[in-house]
Image (cartoon, grey):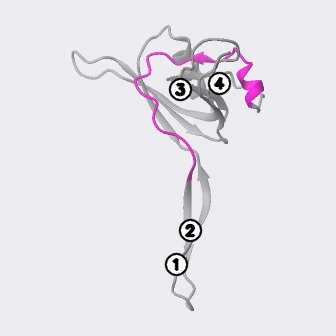
């Protein structure tokens, strides 16, 4: 799987339009892409008459992704993520491509997800002697997640 970041100027909102873009750059050397997706906060109410707790979905939260990458100063994706973290308000388009490759051929595409996220941190961890220098990148998802299923080649 890979994770990519795009410029904040992207205005496309459909799977077809997003798939057609070539402006995303891979955030290189990422160790793991953590889980993401729809989660709901809940509220509850218990009427005196029944004593049965009623539960309701209240606030949708599509998640937070904490990425760890081996720091590489020349990596275009890491540079873009650091710049996005310095941006005080803008959400950036993110693309996640799964490793469920369907082969080659016309129309072939692996599963992919698009969403917008605030890049809320881009930190450096030097560690101890002998440790690898890493970059921590935190993404706070602020939009719905657009999912594109894998497409077999022809």
Residue reaching furthest to the front? 154
Badges 4 and 2: C-beta atoms under 8 Å apart?
no
Q: CA distance from mark 4 to mark 3?
A: 12 Å
Point out the image quarter for the C terminus.
Answer: top right
Measuring from the top left, give residue 148's x and y in whole percent.
66, 31
Say which label, 4 or 1, has the lower sequence index: 1
Say which label, 3 or 2, has the lower sequence index: 2
Is residue 122 or residue 94 the one in the foreground? 94
- Mark 1: few/some/many CA within 10 Å (<14, 14-19, 20+): few
Q: Any mark on residue 43, and which?
A: 2
Query: Number of marks in the image?
Result: 4
What segment is highlighted magenta in the picture? 15-39
The residue where tag 4 is placed is 151
Element class at badge 1: loop
Image quadrant assignment for residue 128 = top left
Q: CA distance from mark 1 to mark 2?
A: 10 Å
Q: Is residue 122 above or below residue 35?
A: above
Nearer the camera: disc 1 or disc 2 = 1
Say which label, 4 or 3, has the lower sequence index: 3
Element class at badge 4: loop
Q: Is residue 19 magenta?
A: yes
Measuring from the top left, give residue 73's x and y in whole percent.
46, 10
**Left or right, residue 95 beside residue 16:** left
The residue where tag 3 is placed is 98
Nearer the camera: disc 4 or disc 2 = 4
Q: CA distance from mark 1 to mark 3?
A: 40 Å
Is residue 63 or residue 91 the one in the foreground? 63
Measuring from the top left, give residue 17's x and y in whole percent.
77, 25
């Amino acid at each position: 799987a890979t994770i990519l970041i795009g410029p904040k100027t992207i205005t496309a909102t459909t799977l077809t339009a997003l798939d057609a873009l070539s402006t995303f750059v891979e955030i290189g050397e990422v160790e793991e892409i953590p889980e993401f997706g729809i989660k709901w906060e809940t509220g509850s109410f218990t009427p005196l008459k029944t004593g049965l707790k009623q539960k309701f979905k209240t606030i949708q939260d599509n998640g937070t992704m904490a990425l760890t990458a081996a720091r590489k100063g020349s990596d275009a994706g890491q540079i873009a993520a650091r710049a996005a973290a310095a941006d005080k308000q803008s959400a950036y388009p993110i693309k996640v491509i799964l490793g469920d490759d369907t082969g080659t051929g016309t129309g072939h595409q692996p599963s992919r997800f698009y969403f917008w996220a605030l890049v809320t941190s881009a930190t450096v961890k030097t560690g101890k002697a002998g440790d690898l220098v890493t970059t921590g990148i935190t993404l706070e998802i602020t939009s719905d997640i657009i999912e594109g299923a894998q497409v077999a080649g022809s």
